[in-house]
Amino acid sequence: MSEGLVRAMAGAYRDPRGAMARQVAQGLSESRALFHLMLAAALFWVASLPRAVETARGLDIADPVEGAVAAHLFAYLALGPLLGYGLAALVHLVARALGGRGGFLGARSALFWAALLGAPLALGVAALGAVAASASGAGRLPWLALPGYAALGYWLWLFAASIAEAEGFPQTRRVATVVALVFCGFAALLALLSGGAALAG
């Protein structure tokens, strides 16, 4: 990453809405949004590797670690960007229904920038988990979920601030409330679906 990008990211952690406002003032571009998305996907792939390797070692197949790494690479660098574009379009449509005044490019820029801001958080949580598990010798520890939840909550705030600026909402807090409610509802739906699938199986 360039020094300018690192400085911009550091500033965004302190003032996420201001950082997005500077991008809007400079002029949004598809190429920059795509760069943010692909860099975020690569960093998330790196963050996923410790868990992927840990899971792969329990599989009874040839070269399980190599297979897990390749599968995660495909998921994060091929499927992830496609999902990102679809999610950004959905975010914009929801924002417009709630009074947003931005465009599809603005929603993509905000989401992909927020994803990039979240990638170092994911790396930090993954590193903490790997170090703690190695030190304890007992695999994954229950308390390690706490930093992950804290990072997720902070990321939701970063995303809410970015989308609030890109869509022209006056208050970040209201956008954050909507984002948190939608995320919790989606998580509950996934839990219900996974629970139903487990019972059916």
Image (cartoon, rainbow, N blue to C red):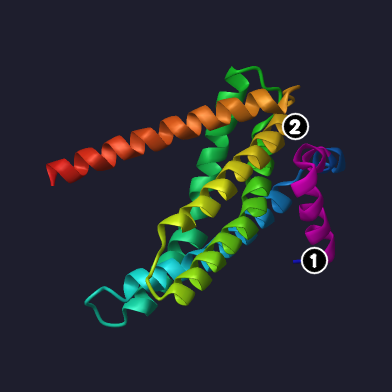
Identify the residue shown where x is 52% and y is 39%: 87
154, 48: nearer the viewer: 154
Residue 163 vs 69, above or below: the answer is: above
Highlighted range, magenta? 2-21
Residue 2 in picture, x, y percent from top left: 80, 66
Q: Residue at x 51, y 51 (%)?
A: 146
102 on left or right of 132:
right
- Which residue is label 2 attached to? 165
Q: Compare marks 1 and 2 and give the one earlier in the sequence.
A: 1
Density class for disc 2 (Cα within 10 Å; few <14, some 14-19, many ≥20) is many
**Which residue shows up at 56% across the image and 31% down it?**
179
Numbered disc total: 2
The tag on residue 2 is 1
Tell me the amino acid under the disc marked 2: Glu
Residue 35: which quarter of the image? bottom right
Query: Is residue 163 rendered to the left or right of residue 76?
Result: right
- Point out which mark residue 180 bears: none
